[in-house]
Amino acid sequence: QVQLVESGGGLVQAGGSLRLSCAASGIIFSINFMGWYRQAPGKQRELVASINSAARTNYADSVKGRFTISRDNAKNTVYLQMDSLRPEDTAVYYCYFIAGTPVPTGYWGQGTQVTVSS
């Protein structure tokens, strides 16, 4: 059974940095997509950043230039380096993987709280 375990959330002042990690446990093959989503109170979950198997990255406009997504294939882990954090970045952050063949399956992490104080 595959589980995604997140770490690295917390409380930080505006302008500060945090690094989130998400590691897959269990047997998992062919991870095609790794992404970070976030959900603030009263808002829909939104894609923050993603990276595919070719290491192509994609970012929400609101985080471009401040956040960096990376992956370690050997460890089945994805990271999100968040710099110059703003109060509006406050949310629960979730990682999401798409993996497996021939029918890809989606997996969600449990979420980690990021709170940015002004």
Image: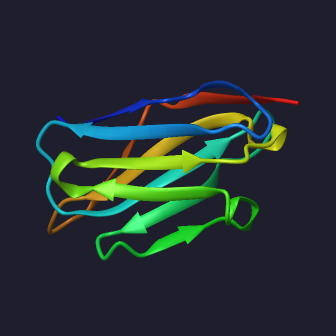
Residue in front for this viewpoint, 39 or 101: 39
Query: Where, quadrant-wise, is the N terminus in this rendering?
Result: top left
Q: Is residue 102 left or right of residue 9?
A: left
Q: Residue at x 42, y 66 (%)?
A: 51
x%, y% of residue 29?
Answer: 14, 56
x%, y% of residue 100?
Answer: 18, 60
Report the coloring of the rendering.
rainbow
Indicate whether 83 appears above or below 70: above
Residue in front for this viewpoint, 82 or 89: 82
Q: Residue at x 73, y 43 (%)?
A: 85
Indicate whether 3 appears above or below 67: above
Picture quadrant of residue 32: bottom left
x%, y% of residue 83?
Answer: 65, 47
x%, y% of residue 74?
Answer: 16, 52
Q: Residue furthest right?
A: 118
Q: Residue at x 68, y 65 (%)?
A: 64
Q: Is residue 86 left or right of residue 72?
A: right
Q: Residue at x 67, y 65 (%)?
A: 65
Residue in front for this viewpoint, 90 or 97: 90
Picture quadrant of residue 41: top right
Q: Is residue 74 left or right of residue 15?
A: left
Picture quadrant of residue 48: bottom right
Labels in figure, total: 0
Q: Is residue 104 left or right of residue 79?
A: left
Query: Where, quadrant-wise, is the C terminus in this rendering?
Result: top right
Indicate whether 92 appears above or below 38: above
